[in-house]
Image (spheres, helix red, strand yellow):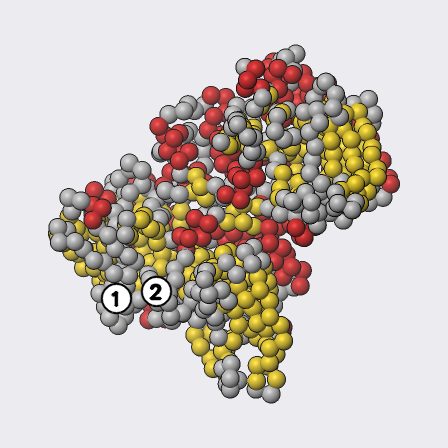
Amino acid sequence: RATMADAIVDCKAEYSSGDDRVCGEGQTVVNEFVDKLRDVIGGGCVSGNDVDARVLEIMNQFEWERICADQRFCRKFLNFNRHRYTRHMVATNENFSVLIICWYPGQATPIHEHGWNTGAYYRVLRGGIEVHSQMAVDRLHRPVFFNHIVSTAKDGSVVMKDSNQYHKTVAVPSAETTISLHVFSPPYFECRHSSDPTDICFEKMDAHVPYVHCVSDQHYLWEEKLCDVVAKVESTRVYSNFSNLFDLLRKTITVNADGSHDPDNVVKVQSLLERLYFNPKEIERYSSFRDNAYTRNLIGYDDKFTLLLLCWEKGQMSPIHDHAGSNCWVKVMRGTLQEVVYRREEGQSVPYRTTNFTEGGVTYMHDRLGVHKMGNPNSEEIACSLHIYSPPYHECLIFDEVTGEEKKVSISVAYGARFPFMERKLDLEGCPGRPICTLNALSAEIKKVLATTNPGENCANVLKTVFQRLKFCDGMWKKFIHFDPMRYTRNLLVFDKEYSLVLICWLPSQSTPIHVHEVSSSHVMTYVYILEGGLTFQFYDSENPENLDSNCLTSSLPEESRSLSRTVMNAGDAVAMASESMGYHKASNLSTESPCISLHLYSPPYIDCQYANNGEIKEVPVAYCSEHIEPTRGEAAQGVPTFVTGSPPMGAPNLNLEVAARCRPKVFANFYSFSQLVQKAFSSGKAKCDRNTLIFFDRFQFNPLEWRKFACVCNGRYTRNLVACGEDYSLYLNFF
């Protein structure tokens, strides 16, 4: 017990007088405290002596004794670490954040600042702290502080008037530990500082002291709300995924009736991109490279925008081009990207600005700013960049770099191709039932069929009558139909607990790799309906499945793998296939002239098409085109622990996270969203650690940029770093 205390001290030893029977008192104190702050700090940035005085008064009224009496609350918010002070996020919203910080004697923050517009208040609840400010640098470039403020638990609350200046805070070297309460407005999250203590510069503040996730649903600033404040919260990093990004952009981007964007909306989207960080493994899922040209890979499509990942081989550049009046935001995801901006003068393109953007860099472009070309200037490394075009466009102008001649070209990726499928007028007179004109109506009909019909051929026939009632109008389907010259596209329409619906678009001769449908140990029923063109399913048998190795465009089979049979489907055909009967298979558009469009329904949901390629597991990703139909909540998902019933608050990230953990082999998440699921899983002993829990735990992928922040290095001994803590669980990052 004494040895473990060197790694982490459990607050139960410090507050043994706490009583589990007083459960809820601590949270009641926090709720009352936050409500009072809301009344005072309702407009965001704090200014004025009257506001300062009122906030300090509220902090002085914080009932610390009631907190200490609630042992479960203490276990959640009062944790000490021998290697670094701990910052516990108690509450946060668009106007302010509240933290409780726990210090061992002598522990100190790095030299940092809070930003020019941040109001900072603190109160020492136990022990004492020293704030060192008004920093200068001596001849040896060592920081020297000229102002020292010492605060103890006997003193009242303090407002930091110089929080925009470089400073550091130190726990007094006394015999007892220190606990302090901090309020920041606008909200201040990670303590941002320079990783080199000898080089203190705001532009070089590349390190972060993280905070422990302890907040309840009602006091958390969800990713949706971050859109409203992210421009003024310079310390915020949001570790997200492409699914969340798609939903955030749908809520954030506003397009005027004439297709334009207000300047504030342009800045808001740019600020959002600057704060969002994505897992390199998810970026790799959408990456594809070609030697002869850069590639444009569809991530998501909406009426208001197109979301693409562009992949650049060494030295590849785009031609000089415009954007057909569309707004263009770019974020560098990997490598370096170069932008050259031109003015069009007398039929020529005249360069006037060249900028190199490194990983994480964000830029914006519009035709009123000129035309440009972009590319990878590096001859040794590849590059990837995220592009948002709003509104979407299908054609643009390119300009010859020498002659200046302009030429109109089509954009092949994310292009709602006007094939006969899009234009035909259906004869609905002989169609059973009323026409289905919306995705929500289609989802409701599918749920009804799956609930009342046994899986198999009969279910396929009933679903066929449903699909025949679809009314194919351009307004409904243009966001879902996308063709890619490199490979077939899988466009996700519906994803919930019961099934997934994917619209697949095939150009002539395109085919899947050889793959098998697997969702944990579940048997997947696949229902296919051909909307346009024709598909061929080819089934294979192999005693060594690992030998079935292919890439996305071609399938080379070893001699021992033989084609058992094949099924040909034409427009209007429907078929039902079970995963065990399908086995290893591939689907192909055998036409060399016509495209094909097919609907694929999987129950239970199946999303990520995995296959083997040269010994590696690869994936054909989905494009997020859904109107976000929320999953059914409050029911147990197979393959994951039973979760507590109830809906998350409005704007909660990853509404589909529980379902994703059931049917996706990889789930890209941040620590907070994961900890919320853990809280649901283990609250009050409602679930136990078993094999399903391990499966659930194994599927989550975390961003290295996020987890590395929690790692404390200690020579000769491993460290246990608290990441999240609730009343029924704790989540640690152990660093060896």
Where does residue 300 sit, x and y in percent of width and height? 46, 57
> Along the horizontal axis of the image, is 607 left or right of 271?
left
Where does residue 734 sit, x and y in percent of width and height? 50, 30
Q: Is residue 509 visible?
A: yes
Residue denoted by label 1 = 509
Q: Of helix, strand and loop, which one carries label 2?
A: loop
Where does residue 48 sit, x and y in percent of width and height? 85, 44
Residue beneath the point at 67% across and 27% down = 102
Residue located farthest toward the right when viewing the structure as drawn: 49
Q: Amino acid at mark 2?
A: Met
Circle 1 packing at 10 Å, graded few (<14), some (14-19), many (20+), is some
Residue located farthest toward the front when viewing the structure as drawn: 140
Q: Is residue 236 visible?
A: no
Residue denoted by label 2 = 486
Circle 2 packing at 10 Å, graded few (<14), some (14-19), many (20+), is some
Residue beneath the point at 45% across and 33% down = 634
Disc 1 to disc 2, how far (Cα)?
11 Å
Q: Is residue 544 above or below residue 679?
A: below
> Along the horizontal axis of the image, is 365 left or right of 244?
right
Q: Is residue 193 above or below residue 725?
A: below
Eye-nearest disc, 1 or 2: 2
Q: Name the quadrant containing residue 11.
A: top right
Where does residue 438 sit, x and y in percent of width and height? 42, 56
Q: Name the quadrant containing residue 694.
A: top left
Mark seen at residue 210: none
Mark 1 vs 2, N-terminal side? 2
Q: Of helix, strand and loop, which one carries label 1?
A: loop
